[in-house]
Amino acid sequence: MAGRVQGKVALVTGGAMGLGKADCIGLAEEGAKVIVTDIDIAKAQAVADAIGGEALPHDVRFEDQWQRVLGHIEERHGRLDILVNNAGNVIFESIEDCSTENFRLQMAIHVEGTFFGCKYAIPLLRKSNSASIINMASAASLLGYSSIIAYTAAKGAIRSMTKSIAMHCQEKGYPIRCNVLMPGAIETPMVQAVSGRAGKEEPVPEGVLPKEALGAPKDVANAVLYLASDESRFLTGVEIPIDNGLFVRPER
C-alpha cells in the first residue's frame, strides 16, 4: 500500500531534533524523500541516515544558503513537493530586557528564514502536481506571553505571511497550498531546557491528554503529514493550533 506522501520530495529545516526530527520521520515513513537541513549537520546526518534521506548544512538566516540548498534539490530531484519551515529558537526576554541584537536575531531566524524559504522554493514547488508549504508558528503568537517578546512577534509575522503567500499562489494558479501550524508546549529539547531538565525526556502518555500535559512531537508531525498530503487539498491559508485547547481555554 502506497504511503500518504509516497514519492514526494520534502525539505524540512531544523530537522536535526525536536519537532523537525519528528516531521522528517513521519514524512519518510509515509514514503517521502526527505532532505533534512540544520545548522548542526552531524545531528541532521544522523536523522537522514535513520530515514534514508539526505542531509545538508543550512542556516536559514542567509539567502545564499537557501539558494544553495534549493539548487541542490533541483539538480538532484528536479522539483519540490513539500516545504516545512521549521527551524527556530527562543530567547526569554521581555520588552524591557530584550536587546536589539536578540530581537533582530529572532526575526532573522523565524521571519526572514520563512520568507527566504517560501520565496526561493516556490519556483521548484510549481513543478509539482500538488505542493504544500507548512510554516511553523506557535500558540505563543495567539497569547500575551510577556517573557518572549521577540519570539511571539516573529511567530505572529509568520502567521500573517502564510496567508499572503497562500493567496498569492492561488491567484497565480500555482499548484501550491500554504498553511501554518501553531504548536503549544511540546516535549522537545527546547522545552526540556527551559523547564530546567535539559536532556531529560519525560514520556507523553497515549490517549486524550489532560490540560496540564505536554504534547508529543508526533502530535505536530501528524498535522504536518496531513497538510503535506493530498488529503488536505482543500485547505490553504489556514492556521491550526496544536495546543490541547490552550487558546480557547477561559483560564490559562
Image (cartoon, rainbow, N blue to C red):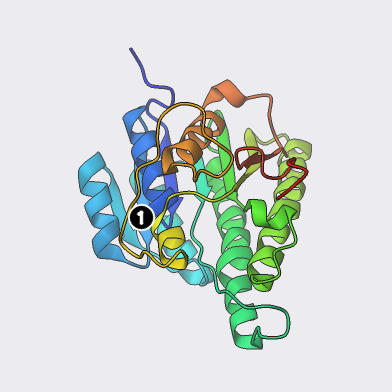
Tell me if I can see residue 196 in this picture: yes
Up the image or down, 122 lies above or below 128; here it is below
Q: Residue at x 56, y 32 (%)?
A: 227
Q: Quadrant of residue 181?
A: top right
> Can you give x and y, in whole percent of width and height, for residue 159 in the image?
71, 52
Residue matched to label 1:
17
Quarter of the picture holding the N terminus? top left
Q: Residue at x 36, y 16 (%)?
A: 2
Helix, strand, or loop for circle 1? loop
Give whichever of 195, 8 is nearer the camera.
195
Q: Quadrant of residue 14?
A: bottom left
Q: Neighbour class for label 1 at 10 Å: few (<14), some, many (≥20)?
A: many
Q: Is residue 133 left or right of residue 215?
A: right
Count of number-bearing discs: 1
Up the image or down, 73 lies above or below 227; here it is below
Up the image or down, 37 lies above or below 182; here it is below
> Can you give x and y, in whole percent of width and height, for residue 26 in the image?
38, 35
Which residue type does callout 1 highlight? Answer: Met
Q: Residue at x 73, y 41 (%)?
A: 249
Q: Is residue 156 left or right of residue 127?
A: right
Give whichever of 17, 11 is nearer the camera.
17
> Can you give x and y, in whole percent of width and height, for residue 119 in the image?
62, 56
Residue that sits furthest to the top in the current view: 1
Q: Residue at x 63, y 37 (%)?
A: 176
Tell me if I can see residue 52 in this picture: no
> Can you give x and y, in whole percent of width and height, for residue 143 in the image?
73, 56
